[in-house]
C-alpha cells in the first residue's frame, strides 16, 4: 500500500513475484510509484541485489571483516542506505519499518550492524562472515548463533506457557482438556480454577489483584516488608527473600533505599510501545474477491505496520479446519510498533510513539483499521462492510511493551565491560531483595525473563 499522504494518491501493488535479480526487481519496481524516479529504482535494485560493489572499500579503502563491522556498528541503517547505498527519501520508504518487529524502531534509530546481522538488505557487497562483532545487539547476536533454537509463538502469546507452569506449580488449578492434562497445543482450551491459587495449604500461592506499592528490604537477618493493596485496603507480608520480577523502572520507585547509581540503571530503559490487534470476521469473502491476504505500507502515514488475514490458521490440533472457504469465519491480525520515525535516539523514538498511542482512542484505532481495508480490499474488487463483516475487535495496546535492547549507535556501554551496562548495574541484589524481569537483561523474550528469574534466585543472600 502506497498511501496518498506520501505518494500523492493511493497505489495498491501486488507483492513482488519476480525473481531476486536486478531484472526482476526492475520489473517489480516498474509496477510501483517508484518508477517515477529512475534514481529510486536504481537505489532499490542496488540495495537488494548488488553483491559485487563494496561501499566501505570504495569510501574508506581496504578494511578487514571486523573493521567493516565496526563501521556498521556506528551507523544507523538510514545512514548506511543514504550515505553508502545512495538511497533517497522515497527509496527509504521500502526500508523504514524493517527494524520494527525485532528492534522496536525505524531505520533512523537502529544500528546498521544489527540490521546486517538480522539479514536485511543492503550489505551483500561487503562479503562479511557470520561472526560477532563488538557492539552487536542481543537479538542480532541471537540470530547469528549457529545453535539458536527457532522462535516459538503461541496463539495467545505467552499466556499458554504461564498457564502450563501454573498447572505444574499448583495441581488442579488448570483443568484437563478432553479428559487429559493440557499440552502446549490444547492449553488454550483449558479452564482455570482461580479458587485454588491462594489456598493456605499450597506450597505455592498466587495472590491476584494485589498491587505492591512499597518494599522495605530487611537489614541483616530482618525480613523484608512488602506492602500491597487488595480491594482498596493496604496489607503487608514479610519474607526472608523477595524477588522483584516487574518492570525495572517500577522497581526503582517502590524498593526503598536503593543506591542512586542503581536507580539510574533501573530507570535507563524505556519500553517499546506497540499494539497487537485481532478482528474476528464473520467471513472473508471480500478479501477473496480482492485477492488480498496481507497489506503492508510503503510510507510513514499509514498507521498499521501490517494487516493480515488468518484463514483457518492453526496451532497443532487446537484450531481448524485449514484452510476454510471464504464464507467461513476468519481472523484479521493487525499490529504496529508505534515509533516516531523522525526521532533519535531509540529512546526518543519510543517516547514519540507512546505519546501518539496515548492520544488515540479505541475508535481512532478502529478507524485506522477500516481505512486500510477500504483503501485496499474495497478498491481491488472486494465488498467489505465493517458493520456487517466484523464480529468483534480486540486491541492489546501496550504503551509500555517490550524491553529496550541496547543499540551500539546510541549506547556506548555496549563497547565496555558488561558489568557497566545499565541493566546490569540496575539488577544488583540489595540486601535480601533481588531483581528479575527481561528488563534486567535488556532482552525482550520469554526465555530471557526465565533466565533472569533463575539468576535472581541465585542472587539472594543465604539461600
Image (spheres, rainbow, N blue to C red):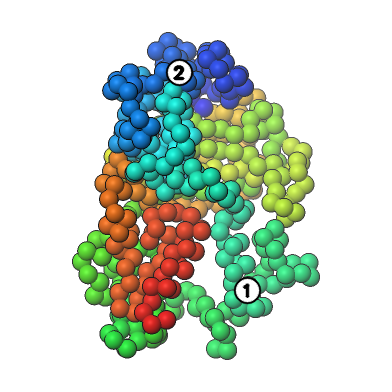
Q: Where residue 281 sits in the image (x, y, percent)? A: 66, 44
**Residue 437 sits in which quadrant?**
bottom left
Of marks 2 and 1, which one's residue comes earlier in the chain? 2
383 sits left or right of 46 in the view: right
Instruction: Kindly state the secondary structure of the residue where label 1 is placed.
Output: helix
Picture coordinates of residue 215 (x, y %)?
33, 77
Q: Which residue is mark 2?
A: 52
Q: Residue at x 49, y 31 (%)?
A: 297
| Residue at the left extreme of this rendering | 260
Residue visible at 34% across and 65% down? 427
Q: Quadrant of residue 52?
A: top left
Number of numbered discs visible in the structure rendering: 2
Looking at the picture, tell me which residue is in the foreground, 392 or 14.
14
- Residue 294 visible in the current orientation: yes
- Report the residue marked by disc 1: 168
Quarter that holds the C terminus = bottom left
Q: Is residue 125 above or below residue 227?
A: above
Q: Position of residue 80 (x, y in %)?
A: 35, 28
Determine crowd level at label 2: few under 14, some 14-19, many 20+ residues with C-alpha closer than 10 A.
Answer: few
Q: Residues within 10 Å of mark 1 (few under 14, many from 20)?
A: few
- Residue at position x 49%, y 42% from top? 144
Q: Looking at this view, is 176 or 223 the one in front?
A: 223
* 74 displayed left or right of 280: left
- Mark 2 or 1: in front is 2
Q: Nearer the viewer, residue 314 or 439?
A: 439
Q: Residue at x 72, y 52 (%)?
A: 316
Amino acid at each position: 500500500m502506497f498511501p496518498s499522504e506520501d505518494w500523492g494518491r493511493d497505489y495498491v501493488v501486488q507483492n513482488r513475484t519476480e525473481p531476486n535479480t536486478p531484472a526482476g526487481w526492475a520489473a517489480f519496481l516498474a509496477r510501483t510509484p517508484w518508477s517515477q524516479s529512475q534514481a529510486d529504482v536504481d537505489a532499490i535494485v542496488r540495495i537488494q541485489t548488488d553483491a559485487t560493489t563494496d561501499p566501505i572499500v570504495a569510501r574508506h579503502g581496504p578494511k578487514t571483516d571486523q573493521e567493516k563491522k565496526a563501521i556498521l556498528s556506528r551507523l544507523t541503517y538510514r545512514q548506511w542506505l543514504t550515505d553508502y547505498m545512495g538511497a533517497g527519501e522515497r527509496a527509504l520508504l521500502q526500508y523504514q519499518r524493517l527494524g520494527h518487529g525485532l528492534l522496536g524502531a525505524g531505520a533512523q534509530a537502529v544500528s546498521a550492524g544489527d540490521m546486517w546481522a538480522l539479514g536485511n538488505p543492503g550489505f551483500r557487497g561487503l562479503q562479511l562472515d557470520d561472526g560477532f562483532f563488538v557492539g552487536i545487539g542481543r537479538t542480532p547476536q541471537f540470530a547469528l548463533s549457529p545453535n539458536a533454537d527457532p522462535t516459538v509463538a503461541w496463539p495467545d502469546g505467552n499466556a499458554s506457557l504461564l498457564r502450563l507452569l501454573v498447572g505444574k506449580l499448583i495441581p488442579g488449578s488448570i483443568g484437563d482438556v478432553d479428559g487429559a492434562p493440557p499440552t502446549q497445543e490444547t492449553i488454550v482450551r483449558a479452564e482455570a480454577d482461580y479458587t485454588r491459587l491462594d489456598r493456605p495449604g499450597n506450597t505455592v500461592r498466587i495472590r491476584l489483584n494485589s498491587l505492591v506499592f512499597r518494599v522495605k528490604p530487611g537489614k541483616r537477618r530482618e525480613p523484608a516488608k512488602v506492602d500491597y493493596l487488595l480491594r482498596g485496603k493496604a496489607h503487608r507480608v514479610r519474607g526472608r527473600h523477595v524477588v522483584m520480577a516487574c518492570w525495572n523502572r517500577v522497581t526503582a520507585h517502590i524498593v526503598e533505599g536503593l543506591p542512586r547509581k542503581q536507580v539510574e540503571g533501573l530507570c535507563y530503559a524505556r519500553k517499546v510501545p506497540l499494539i497487537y490487534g485481532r478482528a474476528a470476521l464473520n467471513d472473508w469473502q471480500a478479501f477473496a474477491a480482492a485477492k488480498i491476504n496481507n497489506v503492508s505500507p510503503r510510507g510513514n502515514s499509514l498507521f498499521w505496520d501490517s494487516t493480515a488475514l488468518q484463514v483457518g490458521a492453526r496451532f497443532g490440533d487446537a484450531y481448524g479446519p485449514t484452510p476454510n472457504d471464504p464464507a467461513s469465519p476468519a481472523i484479521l491480525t493487525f499490529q504496529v510498533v508505534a515509533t516516531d520515525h523522525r526521532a533519535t535516539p531509540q529512546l526518543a523514538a519510543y517516547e514519540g510513539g507512546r505519546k501518539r498511542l496515548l492520544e488515540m482512542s479505541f475508535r481512532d484505532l478502529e478507524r485506522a483499521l477500516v481505512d486500510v481495508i477500504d483503501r485496499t480490499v474495497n478498491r481491488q474488487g472486494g465488498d467489505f462492510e465493517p458493520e456487517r463483516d466484523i464480529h468483534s475487535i480486540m486491541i492489546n495496546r501496550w504503551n509500555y511493551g517490550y524491553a529496550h535492547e541496547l543499540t551500539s549507535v546510541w549506547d556506548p556501554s555496549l563497547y565496555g565491560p558488561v558489568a557497566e551496562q545499565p541493566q546490569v548495574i540496575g539488577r544488583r541484589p540489595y540486601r535480601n531483595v533481588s531483581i528479575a524481569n527481561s528488563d534486567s537483561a535488556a532482552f525482550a523474550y520469554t526465555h530471557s525473563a526465565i533466565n533472569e528469574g533463575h539468576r535472581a534466585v541465585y542472587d539472594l543472600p543465604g539461600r
